[in-house]
């Protein structure tokens, strides 16, 4: 089963490293546009009251859900077994039969429709887990940015899964996007309020893409009220204002996003794009320079740059990029594998074998189900056969 709750955005910027950056400042006259004005007096509302957004209880367990759970779990079961039964109830073949779609739903709506995106299923699982007495929380996962081979864009992902705290200090993670999950990714347990911010932000994006500006604005506002530090909602609020022709309000929203998260790459990218569109080349150039300075510090960007160098035949450049990437992140077997092939193409078979052995070892130590050591072992066997009579 492959499920995803992520909003995917292509932007021409790279992940910024944690270092000092210039203080953000208004350049489009937005200094007087406060957070309160953005939320409560936006020109997008045209002076009218925004549609009411029902404050959803994401985790309501309906009588039908309770009856369903009673068929699989009971309070007498040990905690670990209860979790196994819950997983089987939801994900077992021929049981619940979840179907993925792009709509964000509450726990009750997801159960009723048996459809939703990954956040929908996460809502349902957290609700059900808590109902059967398990300590379940939402968890944000820092899925790394992925660059296109041109180096001009990357795929930004936001992902939420389930963290379970069991007795005896045991923990479990339930992720409905298991093909992309890697235990090496940074992650943190979040409060229910921030999960609701994710929910309303998703709903806001759905309305924005459907052209319903008022409902989009109302949902972004609700998400920010749940968690004022949730930068994605501020950024999307900026995108909404820019789409509707209010560049100063867009700038103000992006700056609010950076106040919440000064390294928010989508907000930084959108500010640079906004300034370029408004003819403010000097300010746009500042952002391009910041991106150029910091993007090479990201190991995944360096991996994709190395891939590009490898394809073009510049193996020494690929080796340099990959060694930097490995110094920054030494648990990615892909980095070692490409380094091995780069050495092979450079004529150094001994180094190629040594680095492929390392790729196999790292894959064997990884908890990532996609890191198959056999894949690298087969490559190693092929390398070992090279040069034999």
Image (spheres, helix red, strand yellow):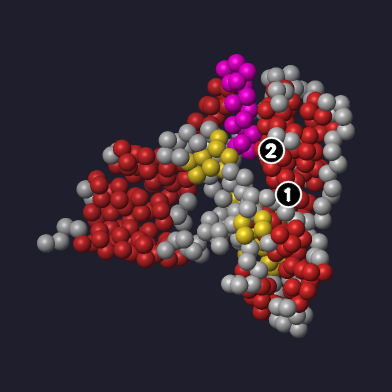
Image coords of residue 187 (percent x, y): 62, 55
Residue matched to label 1: 199
> Above or below — where is 42 with respect to 357?
above
User: What secondary structure predominates along the stretch shown in magenta?
Assistant: helix
Decide whether residue 38 is among the magenta residues: no
Residue at the image position 57 percent from the left and 17 percent from the top: 281
For residue 231, say whether it is visible.
no
Residue matched to label 2: 210
Image coords of residue 319 (percent x, y): 34, 44
Residues in magenta?
264-281
As drawn, is 291 to the left or to the right of 84?
left
Residue at the image position 69 percent from the left and 56 percent from the top: 120
How much space separates mark 2 and mark 1, taking CA atoms?
17 Å
Crowding at dot 2, Cα within 10 Å, few <14 / some 14-19 / many 20+, comes out as few
Front residue of 64/8: it is 64
Image coords of residue 257 (percent x, y): 70, 36
Marks 2, 1: nearer the viewer: 2
Front residue of 72/294: it is 72
As drawn, is 359 to the left or to the right of 215?
left
Image coords of residue 143 (percent x, y): 57, 50
As drawn, is 381 to the left or to the right of 138?
left
């Amino acid at each position: 089963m492959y499920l995803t709750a992520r909003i995917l955005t292509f932007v021409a910027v790279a992940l910024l490293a944690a270092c000092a950056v210039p203080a953000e400042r208004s350049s489009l006259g937005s200094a007087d546009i406060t957070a309160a004005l953005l939320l409560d007096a936006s020109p997008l509302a045209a002076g009218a009251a925004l549609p009411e957004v029902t404050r959803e209880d994401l985790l309501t367990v309906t009588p039908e859900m309770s009856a369903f759970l009673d068929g699989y779990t009971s309070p007498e079961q040990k905690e670990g077994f209860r979790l196994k039964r819950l997983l089987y109830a939801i994900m077992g073949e021929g049981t619940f039969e979840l179907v993925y779609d792009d709509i964000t739903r509450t726990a009750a709506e997801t159960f009723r429709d048996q459809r939703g995106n990954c956040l929908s299923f996460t809502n349902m699982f957290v609700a059900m887990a808590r109902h059967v007495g398990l300590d379940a929380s939402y968890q944000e996962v820092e899925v790394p940015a992925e660059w296109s081979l041109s180096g001009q864009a990357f795929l930004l992902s936001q992902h939420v899964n389930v963290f379970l705290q069991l007795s005896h200090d045991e923990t479990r993670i339930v992720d409905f996007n298991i093909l992309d999950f890697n235990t090496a990714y940074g992650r943190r347990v979040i409060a229910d309020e921030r999960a609701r911010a994710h929910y309303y932000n998703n709903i806001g994006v759905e309305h924005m893409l459907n052209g319903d500006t008022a409902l989009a604005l109302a949902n972004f506002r609700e998400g920010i009220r749940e968690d004022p530090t949730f930068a994605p909602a501020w950024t999307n609020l900026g995108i909404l204002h820019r789409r509707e022709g209010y560049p100063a309000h867009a700038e103000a929203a992006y700056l609010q996003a950076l106040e919440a998260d000064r390294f928010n790459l989508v907000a930084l990218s959108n500010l640079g794009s906004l300034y370029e569109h408004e003819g403010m080349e000097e300010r746009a150039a500042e952002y391009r320079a910041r991106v150029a300075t910091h993007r090479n510090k990201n190991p995944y960007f360096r991996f994709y740059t190395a891939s590009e160098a490898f394809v073009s035949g510049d193996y020494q450049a690929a080796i340099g990029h990959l060694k930097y990437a490995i110094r920054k992140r030494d648990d990615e077997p892909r980095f070692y594998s490409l380094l091995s092939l780069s050495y092979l193409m450079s004529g150094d078979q001994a180094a190629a074998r040594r680095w492929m052995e390392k790729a196999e070892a790292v894959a064997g130590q990884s908890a990532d189900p996609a890191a198959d050591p056999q894949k690298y072992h087969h490559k190693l066997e092929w390398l070992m056969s090279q040069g034999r009579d």
